[in-house]
Amino acid sequence: MKIAVTITLALALLVGLTIGALGGGGSVLTLPIFVYLLGIPAQQAIPMSMLIVGSTSFLGALLHYYYGHFHTKATLLFAVTGMMGAFLGSFLTNKVSQPLLMLIFATLMLTAGIAMLRTRGASQGQQKCHVVRCLAIGAGVGTLTGFLGIGGGFMIVPALVLFAGIPTKNAMGVSLAVITLNSAAGLMGLIQHTSINWKLTLSFLGLALIGMLAGIVIKKSSRATPSQRIRLDYHCASLSHSRCQSLGFLEALRPIAWIFHH
């Protein structure tokens, strides 16, 4: 168990690095780490993941805002319906069994990976932040945040870039701000029904914050030209979603095996 905890805390740095560099993706790793590496029940791991991802995203959002990588209108539109969706979605978590929760999580990861592969050749959209579109996407992402404890950055960033026409660097700041608000709303609903391992959660959070700061510094200090940065963002996003797809296959097998053995 001590070895598993050590590995978990080491992976916390990777979670933070992912959030800082890509504007999301941390919860894609955090939830499976808690459930399958440490054996924590999914219903307890979800609020722990939500607290960690929400806290790191808050600091990341502040730094992106300081650097001017932000879009206030998009943030407000995504957050309005997103927070409501997260709070309502949190009440569904304890009504679903752990195998089904993780199977839904795996399916979502697979879907995200396939969608990203299909849009690899797409360029950034030229549309404005359409109110109805942003509200609808915000509600969907928020519900998933409350239900599964995922931040939704892997959905928010592509949605902002492809459908709202927001530059990638600004979309990352918006994504982190929305994840923060959605996580807070979802946690308010979940904290009433479950307990949190505070020692583990805070230890993981501390290391994730260090990793996140490193990710933002790496992103900020890049000397690449604007066109090179766009290509870098593309490759980072592809790597993140390829990881999601790979994890999805692994996670899909675990709950299915559990079902056949119980």
Image: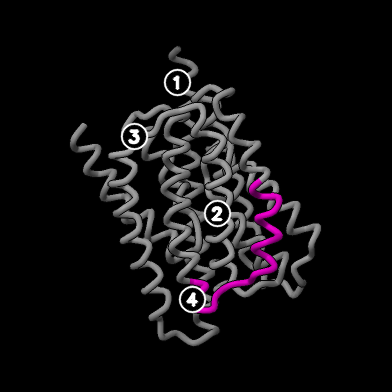
User: Dot 1, crowdedness within 10 Å: few (<14), some or many (≥20)?
Assistant: few
Q: Quadrant of residue 214?
A: bottom left
Alpha carbons under labels 2 and 4: distance apart: 18 Å
Q: Is 159 situated left or right of 181 in this image?
A: right
Q: Residue at x 38, y 67 (%)?
A: 215
Residue extent of the magenta highlight: 64-83
Residue projecting furthest to the top: 262
Q: Are marks 1 and 4 in contact (CB under 8 Å)?
A: no
Residue on which the image places disc 4 = 66
Alpha carbons under labels 3 and 1: distance apart: 25 Å
Q: Residue at x 48, y 51 (%)?
A: 54
- Residue 120: x %, y % from top left: 61, 64
SS class of the residue under badge 3? loop
Residue on which the image places disc 2 = 179
Name the mark on residue 197: 3
- The mark tally for this picture is 4
